[in-house]
Image: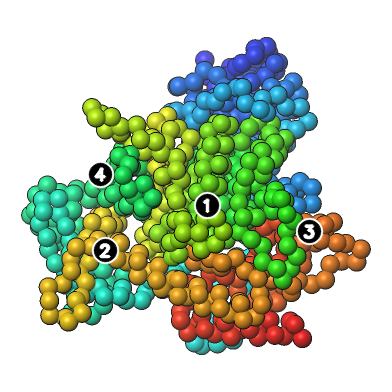
Amino acid sequence: MHPNSLANSIKYIVSLPTAAALFTSSTWTRVFFVTASTLTLPLRHPFSVLSAIKMSATPAFATAATNTGPTDGRTASTKNGNVLSKLTSWRPRNVGSRWRSFSISSVPSLVVRNSVSSASSSSSSQSGDSVSPSTRHFSTSKASSSGGGSKLSSSRAQAAIKLLPSYLTDARAITQYSPSTPEGALQLSVAENQLSELPVSGMVGIVENTKAGGIGTLAGDKREMRLVDVLSQLASSNIARPSDDGASPMQVFERDMIYYQPTQGVPGLRDAMVDYLQNLLVSPTHPSTSSKFNPENIVLGAGCNAVLENLCMVLANPGDAVLIPTPYYAAFEFDLVARAGCHIVSVNTLDHHETKVPSCKVPIPPEFYYPNRSSLELAYTRAVEETGRAPRVLLLSHPNNPLGICYPPHVVQECIDWCREKEVHLISDEIYAGSVFRKERTGGEEKGQPTFVSAMALGSSDTSTAQEPAAGLGLGPYIHLVYALSKDFALSGLRVGVAYTENEEILMPLQKLNDLCQISSQTQLLVERMMCANAVLATEDGDSESDKSQKFVDVYLKANQDNVRERCDALHSCLEDEGIPYLPADSGLFVWMDFREFLPPLPSGMTEATESLESMEQRERQLYMSLMKKYGLLFTPGMSMRNERAGFFRCVFTAASGEEFELGLVRLRKFVEEMRR
C-alpha cells in the first residue's frame, strides 16, 4: 500500500521508552529519533506530520540505516512539551541582563537523502542528564506544509539574514574612503591584510621542488617579489607537480583535473598541508616528539567557515549547545547556527577572577579574558538549562579574534582537561597561528615563555613504539583543529580551509559533507606548489649564489609577521600617546581598544552594575555611529562580538594601506581630543 494512503487512514498510538519513526515520500526520507515515556503518534501525510506529533525528544543527525534509537545518551526524557516545529525565526536570547545565547528558536526536522553515521555517542553519567521539563520547550508551530516564509523565499533564507551582525549593514550604508571620496569612512573592521601586497624582503625568486628531486627555478628579475608575483608564476608553471613520482613536465591544466577529486582533498596537498601544520603548530614547542599529523585525518574544504560548520554538524545535533568564550568572532553565529542549527552559549570570563574588572581609563589585564573552570562550569550549567542536555562543543579562537592575543599554555591545557572530563568536544580555531608576531611573553611569571602553544601540541600524546610508529598526534576523539590560509597568507579568495580530527567515528561523515564545499582541482594544485616551493633569497653582494634552502612559506610568514608587528606598534604608540587603554596585541591583525570613557552617560538612576543589556547596546551603538559618521572611523563594535561590557572596539590595523592607516591615526587623535574637551 502507498504510504500516503496508509497514513491517511490509520492512527498508531505507541507506548515505548524508545521509538524511531520513519515517514517516506518520493525519494526523500524524514528521520526522527525519539526518547519519550509516552509517544502519541497520529500517522498522517509526511509533510504535515509536524503538526500532529506530540512528544518530548531531540531530533538527531542520523539515519535508520545505522541507528535504531536515540543517538544522544544525554538527552533528558520528559512527558510533556513539543519537539519538532517548522524552521521559524532565529533570534538571540537574553538570559538576565548580561548573559546571551544564540540559537534557532525552534529545531527543524531533518531531511536527508543519504546515510550519514551518527555524530555522537556519549556517556549518560554526565551532569545534566535529568532536567526539569520547564527548562526545555520546543513549540510546534501552526505552519503551512511549506514551512513558512513567502512564496518567493523560505523562512530559512529570511532567518539567515537575521544572523548577520547589524554593523555590517551600517558599514554598507556609509560612504567609504577612497581617493575620490576622501571624507569617507576608513574601513578598519574587516579582518584582511593589505600588508600582504608588500614585497617579501630579500626574496627574488621561487624554486619548485618535485618528489623525484627535480628542481625548476622560476627566477624573478632580481627585484623583490610579492605574494601575487609568486602565485602568478606558480599558476602558470608546467613543472611536474610536487607529489608526482616522475619529473616530466605537465600542462598547466592536466586531463585528470577535470574529473571528480577526492572529497577530503588531493593526496599531494594533504601531505604538504600536514608537513606545514607540523612545523607551524607542533615542532616549535615539541621538536622531539614522534607524534605527527596524519594526512588520512585531514579534510580540506572551501574556507575555515565551511570546515568549521561541517565539524559542528558531525559533532553536535540541532539545538545542541556550543560554548564560546567572549568576546568572540561575530560570524561564528552565522557559521554555527544558519545550517548546523547549534545553540551558542557564551562563556563569560570577566567576573571569574579574584579581582574586579578595572574601571574605564584603566586597562583590563588579558587574564580577565581567559576561560577557567569556574566560567566553563557556569556556561555548562546554563547550556543544560537552556537546551535540556549537556553542551557538545567548546570552541576556542586561539590566537584570539577579536582580542589579538594568545591564550597561555596553562589556559588551553585547562580547557583540554575539562573537555575530556566532561566529554565535550574542543575545537581549536587556529587560523591566526602563523600571524603570531611576538614570539615570547614579556611579563609576569610567563616571561620568556612561547607566546603561542597550539592545542594540537598540548593535547597530543606520544603513542609510538619501536615496532609501530604513531599514526597521528594521539589527540583522542575530543580534540579537533580548524585552520585556513585566509589570514596568515591573506588568501581568503582562494578558499582553502583545513579540519583535522582523530575521531574515526566522524571522519567519513566529515568527508561526505565536504562534497558540498570542495576546493577546485586547479586551486589545490596551486596551493600544493606554493607550500612545497623554496624561496630564492638575494645575497648582500648580489653576485654570490643565492640562498635556496628555505621554504617559501617560512620566508613569507617571517616577513609578514615583521610587517604586522611594525604596524601594530604604530597603533600601540598612538593609543599610548592619547591615553586610551588597550590590550597589547601579540598576534592576529587587530587591537582591542577600550573606549568606555567616551560612551554616552548612563540613563538616570542606573549604574554600571544594574545596566541592562539593551542600554549597553544602545549606548555603544551611539558611540559607534559617531565614530563612523562624524570621524570616518569604521571599527568593529564589541557588543556585536558579545563582549560583556559596552565601549570596546576592534581595530583591524592591516585592513588599510599605509596612507590610509596614517590618516586613521590622525582621525583617531582628533576624535579623542574633541571628546575630551
- Type of amino acid under label 4: Pro
Looking at the rendering, in which quadrant would you find the C terminus? bottom right
What is the number of the mark on residue 267? 4
400 left or right of 623 in image: left
What's under tag 3, amino acid-wise? Glu
Q: Earlier in the sequence, mark 1 or mark 3?
A: 1
Which amino acid does the dot numbered 1 rest on?
Answer: Pro
Using the rendered image of the protein, determine whether residue 199 is visible from the camera's viewpoint. Answer: yes
Residue found 73% across the figure and 62% down from its top: 358
Nearer to us of marks 4 and 1 is: 1
> Callout 4: few (<14), some (14-19), or many (20+) C-alpha neighbours within 10 Å?
some
**Disc 2 and disc 1 in contact, CB within 8 angstroms:** no
Mark 1 neighbour density, 10 Å: few (under 14) some (14–19) many (20 or more): many
Q: Are marks 1 and 3 in contact (CB under 8 Å)?
A: no
Q: Nearer the viewer, mark 2 or mark 3?
A: 2
Disc 4 secondary structure class: helix
Q: CA distance from mark 1 to mark 3?
A: 33 Å
Residue 48 image position (x, y, % from top left): 64, 30
Residue, far top: 15
In the figure, 638 relative to 410: above or below? below
- Residue 614: mark: 3
Q: Secondary structure at mark 3?
A: helix
Amino acid type at image mark 2: Phe
Q: Which residue is mark 2?
A: 552
For marks 2 and 3 on the same chain, the one whose residue lies earlier in the sequence? 2
Q: Circle 1 sits on which residue? A: 408
- How far is mark 4 from mark 1, CA to CA? 34 Å
